Image (cartoon, rainbow, N blue to C red):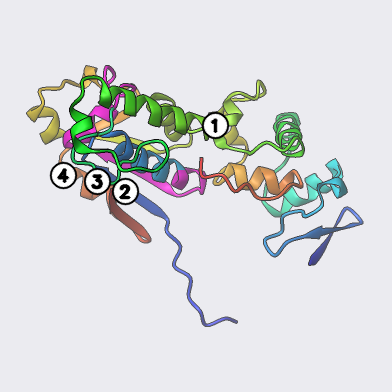
């Protein structure tokens, strides 16, 4: 298993850089991963990441559709906050595994 | 440095020419999946596929129950073609399929179009099929970006790393 150091903390990641142990994640770490993705995180980023983390830790599958039901932001804003592949980017920065959903 | 070359797909152009649930959903899942990966996406609906973007029809699609040799009853037995002619069987089967998909968090067509366009995907209607079925622009979902001739479709589909997929 690979390891990476963010904000002075060494964390376990897979070969694609996704966390294998979500409990190692902190907000300071998120800011540094976001830098690698050329993103500056705002309160909105953290709010939706918290939603994704809670859903993942609760054992629910993550999908792009679920963002519309998050009560935080809609899908359009999600695409603007994490340009490109938002679900992949957001989960990576939020310290949880890459979603396996096709939706 | 690695000598292995990487040729990522940068753009997909999907064509949907059929209007049964499974035809339309194959297109929508692939289109939405491409948008989710950050791939530029165009979807072109033509012939019976137009039903997927006609406002009054898009959330009322059916699946064929006659001559569909892969269709099975709950339990795994093949659905006899003769059963398919019973009135209401097509509606019932379609309702069952939509229910199964909803369980997997697969959205209705209208919401799917919304998700795709929210991520920047573009939806187009075929001009020739519109004329043939006598549809007008106002019959189409607000998510449709335009009505294209086939020549215009090819112009939209151009570019390095671009793929045309006929579902």
Is the residue A98 above or below the residue A69 in the image? below
Task: Tell me the chain of label 3.
Answer: B
Q: Give A26 or B66, whichever is nearer the viewer.
A: B66
In the displayed structure image, the side of residue B154 where residue B128 appears, left or right: left
Labels 2 & 4 near each other (Cβ < 8 A): no
**Magenta stretch in the rendered image:** B33-61
B63 vs B160, nearest the viewer: B63
Query: Residue A23: where, in percent of width, then height?
Result: 86, 46
Regarding mark 2 in the picture, which secondary structure is present there?
A: strand
Q: Earlier in the sequence, mark 3 or mark 2?
A: 2
The residue beneath circle 1 is: A65
Mark 2 to mark 4 CA distance (whole Å) = 12 Å
- The reply to whether label 2 and label 1 mark residues of one chain is no
Packing grade of label 3 (10 A; few <14, some 14-19, many >=20) is few
Q: CA distance from mark 2 to mark 1?
A: 22 Å
Mark sitting earlier along the chain (3/4): 3
Residue at label 4?
B150
**Residue corresponding to mark 2:** B13
- The label shown at residue B69 is 3
SS class, disc 1: helix
């Amino acid at each position: 298993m690979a390891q990476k150091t963010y904000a002075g903390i060494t964390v376990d990641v897979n070969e694609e850089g996704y966390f294998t142990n979500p409990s190692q994640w902190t907000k300071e770490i998120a800011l540094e991963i976001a830098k690698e993705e050329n993103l500056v995180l705002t309160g909105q980023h953290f709010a939706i990441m918290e939603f994704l983390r809670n859903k993942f830790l609760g054992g629910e599958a993550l999908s792009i559709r679920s963002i519309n039901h998050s009560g935080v932001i809609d899908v359009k804003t999600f695409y603007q906050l994490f340009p490109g592949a938002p679900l992949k980017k957001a989960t990576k920065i939020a310290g949880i595994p890459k979603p396996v959903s096709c939706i | 440095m690695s000598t292995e070359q990487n040729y990522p797909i940068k753009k997909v152009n999907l064509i949907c020419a059929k209007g049964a649930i499974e035809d339309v959903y194959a297109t929508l899942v692939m289109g939405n999946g491409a948008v989710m990966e950050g791939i530029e996406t165009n979807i072109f609906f033509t012939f019976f596929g137009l039903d997927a973007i006609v406002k009054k029809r898009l959330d009322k699609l059916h699946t064929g129950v006659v001559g569909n040799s892969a269709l099975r009853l709950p339990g795994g037995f093949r659905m006899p073609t003769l059963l398919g002619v019973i009135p209401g069987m097509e509606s019932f089967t379609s309702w069952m399929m939509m229910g199964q998909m909803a369980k997997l968090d697969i959205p209705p067509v209208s919401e799917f179009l919304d998700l795709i366009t929210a991520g920047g995907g573009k939806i187009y209607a075929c001009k020739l099929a519109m004329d043939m079925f006598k549809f007008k622009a106002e019959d189409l979902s607000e998510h449709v970006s335009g009505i294209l001739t086939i020549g215009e479709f090819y112009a939209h589909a151009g570019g390095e790393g671009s793929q045309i997929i006929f579902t």
